Every structure is written in C-alpha cells, then in structure tokens.
Image (cartoon, rainbow, N blue to C red):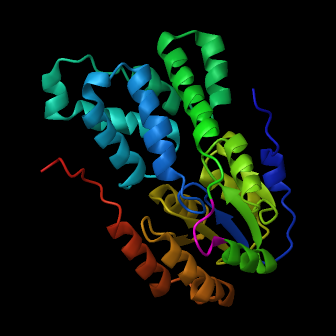
Amino acid sequence: MHMTLFTQADLIALPKRHDALVGLDSDGCVFPTMELKQKQCFHAEIIRHWQLEKLERPLRECAEFVNLYSRWRGQNRFPALLKTFELFADRADVRASGVKLPDTTTLKNFIASGLPLSNAALEKEVDRAGDAELVRLLLWSLAVNANVERHVKNLAPFRGVRECLEKIYAQADLIVVSQTPEEALVREWQASGLAKFPALIAGQELGTKAEHLQLAAGKKYTAGRVLMIGDAFGDLHAARAAGALFFPVNPGHEAASWQCLHAEAFDRFLGGAFAGKYEADLIAEFEALLPEIPPWQP
C-alpha cells in the first residue's frame, strides 16, 4: 500500500510565508486529465467489474455526465459512482433491458460511514467486514489507479498554468487540494516540473477539500485572504465551507480562465477587490456550464 508523503498534521503546520493562502485543484484544473482518466480508466472498469457490457452506451453516458459535464464533476470517486448508478437505474432503456443492476447498498453505507473515502479506508473495511460488494468496490478502485498509472503520463498543464503558479508562489502560500489519490498527484506534479510551487499536495487520504483548506488556513489568515481555484462544484462548495473565495477554471475554457487569473483576478484577490460582484459574475458563468439535469431527461 502506498505510504503518503503528507499528513493532516502537515496541513495544520503549514508554514505561513505570506498573508494569503491559495488552494488549487489538480485534475481538470491544472492538468487536462479528466476526459482521459474518466473515459479510459474509470468508466471502462465500472463496466468490467459490474458486468455491464450489454449496457455500455447508457452507462458511459451517465458516467460522463456525472464526472465531466454536470454539477457533480470532480467529486470523490465513490459518491460519483453512486450518482452514476442512480442515474443509470433511472433510465427507461436500462430498466427495459432486463440486465441486473448494481446493488448500491454497500456503497451507500461506506459513503455514509464517516470514514475517509479512500482506498486505505476501504481496505480496512474489507478486512473488517469481508463483504463481497466491498471487495468488488475495492478491486474496481485499485484497477482504476493501475490504469491511471499505466495510461496517464506526461500530460502538460493547461496553457497559462505555469505563469500563474510562478505569480501565485511569489505572493501567496500555495497547496494542492484534491480528491485524487496522493500517489497520482505527486507523480503528475513532479513529471510536469510543477511540484516546486505548492508547499503541500493534499489528496483524498487527507480528507475532503474543505478539510484541506480548513486545516491549512486555521486562524493564520484573515477574512478574504484564502482563495480556492477549481473546475468543479465540489471546489466551490469546499471554498464556501472553509470561508474562502472561489475562482473557477471553466471546463472547456481552461486557457482563458488561467489568462484571466494571471491578468486580473489574482491581483484583485490580493488587492481586496475580488469578493462581491466580481466573484459572483465569475461563478454565474461557471454554473451555466455545468447543468444538473441530464440531456436524456425531459
């Protein structure tokens, strides 16, 4: 099992170099990894582990909507899997197929358990309970990680990211805030040459994104001096839960978002002119890109 490089204690003890803190998501925000990881790694393994080959098309439509094109984009893999199965089971074509649908009881119980939604916690539950569905869930998650390590390599960050990170690093404390396993995060940040910028890389092992921000910020930064940068509603919700401001990297318009951050938004944040109408207008544009209703529903 992978041993984490960082702990929650490291988040709490984050050195304060500047009077501002920036939390930054990784997949789909810094790196163009979302489509590749989801379509080739996550969704293919859902089909294989739950024997859904006869319903591959509707399964992929549900999984892509949840993980890429909706308000659920970017969340932890286990709640995302549950939402995918819920939308899948609600489809008329799926119900009419006669194919046995996945039993989500064990998945729901794991999500509601209060345990970290990570492979490490899932492994402990498998050892404790020995439940067959827990085993299937763990095997799926481990297979996803293996596929990501095998297929997702040497992806350059979005255009404008490096220049923004240089600017942020010079004027604010910076951490990576993600629900991706740490091992993959560290590998991707090191391979891209960007690992020198964040003081800490927090993956799913260290809790939720909101917890990452809350632990790192503590009482070290005054109101309006913490900013979350992300490409999903989960990032926005994490920012709000931690009392942080939010800058969206718009899916499909990532380079333009990074240009905006570099040219004006980060300076407005540092200068105290980000909160209010400016932030609200950015979020309204972001929300319009991620609907709640799937296109196949009336």
Does residue 107 lie above or below 228 as drawn?
Answer: above
Q: Quadrant of residue 49?
A: top left
The answer to whether residue 222 of the structure is visible from this angle is no
The answer to whether residue 216 of the structure is visible from this angle is yes
Residue beneath the point at 26% across and 16% down: 100
Q: Position of residue 167 (x, y in %)?
A: 73, 80
Residue beneath the point at 57% across and 54% down: 27
- 236 and 240: which is toward the camera: 236
Does residue 155 lie above or below 115 as drawn?
Answer: below
Residue 159 in magenta stretch: yes
Quadrant of image for the N terminus: top right
Residue beneath the point at 61% across and 62% down: 242
Does residue 67 lie above or below 79 as drawn?
Answer: below
Count of number-bearing discs: 0
Residue beneath the point at 36% across and 41% down: 63
What span is colored magenta in the figure?
Answer: 156-161
Residue 14 in magenta stretch: no
Q: Main secondary structure of the magenta part?
A: loop
